[in-house]
Image (cartoon, helix red, strand yellow):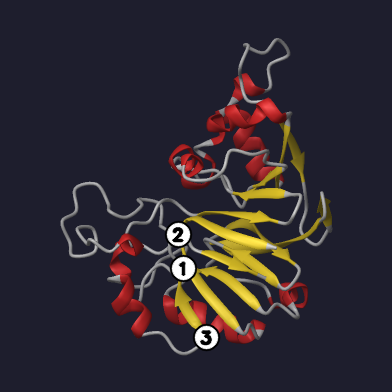
Amino acid sequence: MRITFLGTGGSFGTPMIGCRCEVCTSADPRDRRLRSSVMVESGSTRLLVDCGPDFRQQALAMPFRRIDAVLLTHPHYDHVGGMDDLRPFCKFGGIDVFANRITADCVRHNFPYCFDSDKYPGVPDIRLRVIEPHRLLRVGDIDIMPVEVMHDSLPILGYRFGRLAYITDMKTIADSELEYLDGVEVLVVNALRFERPHHSHQLVADAIAFSRRVGAHRTLFVHSCHHIGLHAEANARLPQGFELAYDGQTLDF
């Protein structure tokens, strides 16, 4: 399978509007971060994890092919704001959207025209599927294990695909969840910045400690804001086995 990082930035994206810091004005393309999202692909199946407000821009940079399902982590706008831009992909047929109950209710509230009994022609043909942690899903030839983490006090979902796990916006995780991450070799997880604690996001040190609890061999950080610093310099500060992911990066696993 392959994972493609469509976006690796925080809720503001980088560059951040109105900011002239060295990161936001950097010429290194790895310092330009759209809102966090990934595509997971096998030979026959494509899964989109989160569909934020930058999805249209992200979609223009990738081959136009069917998306078999969308997996949502939580209801915040930077993760669901691009749902309407799934419309072109509905030419291939309806799209299943998997989410926990809180997120599904939010999508139904924010995009009510997608669920009217008499739909306006051309609206996204999406089918909401409420899922729960620890209940294995299979879409096409990909097995998916949802795990639950906490985004401050909000329960959200991460997803495991075989020996890879994708978790974003985590602040804490219950010890009981770790058994569902046993054997994960590649971990993608949020790391907002190096310093200044945040009420709902991990810092780099938190993410490193979490990865070591999981026992991952390789860890890539996402959902990073401009305060993490220049990509090259931030990467040089990380221990072996840890790295900042960047937009457009692909990883086979």
**Between marks 1 and 3, how big is the CA–CA gap?**
12 Å
- Check disc 1 and report the residue beneath it: 245
Measured along the vertical axis of the image, is residue 153 above or below residue 56?
below
**Between marks 3 and 2, how big is the CA–CA gap?**
18 Å
**Between marks 1 and 2, how big is the CA–CA gap?**
7 Å
Measured along the vertical axis of the image, is residue 30 above or below residue 117?
below
Q: Residue at x 59, y 64 (%)?
A: 167
Q: Residue at x 52, y 68 (%)?
A: 171
Crowding at dot 1, Cα within 10 Å, few <14 / some 14-19 / many 20+, comes out as many
Which of the pair 146/150 is nearer the observer?
Answer: 146
Q: Amino acid at mark 2?
A: Thr
Which of the pair 78/24 is nearer the observer?
Answer: 24
- Check disc 3 and report the residue beneath it: 241
Q: Are marks 1 and 2 in contact (CB under 8 Å)?
A: yes
- Percent from the top left, x then y, of residue 88? 58, 28
Q: Amino acid at mark 1?
A: Ala
- Percent from the top left, x then y, of residue 55? 49, 41
Of the two numbered discs 3 and 2 on the same chain, state the one appearing first in sequence. Answer: 2
Is residue 174 toward the left or the right of residue 139 in the image?
left
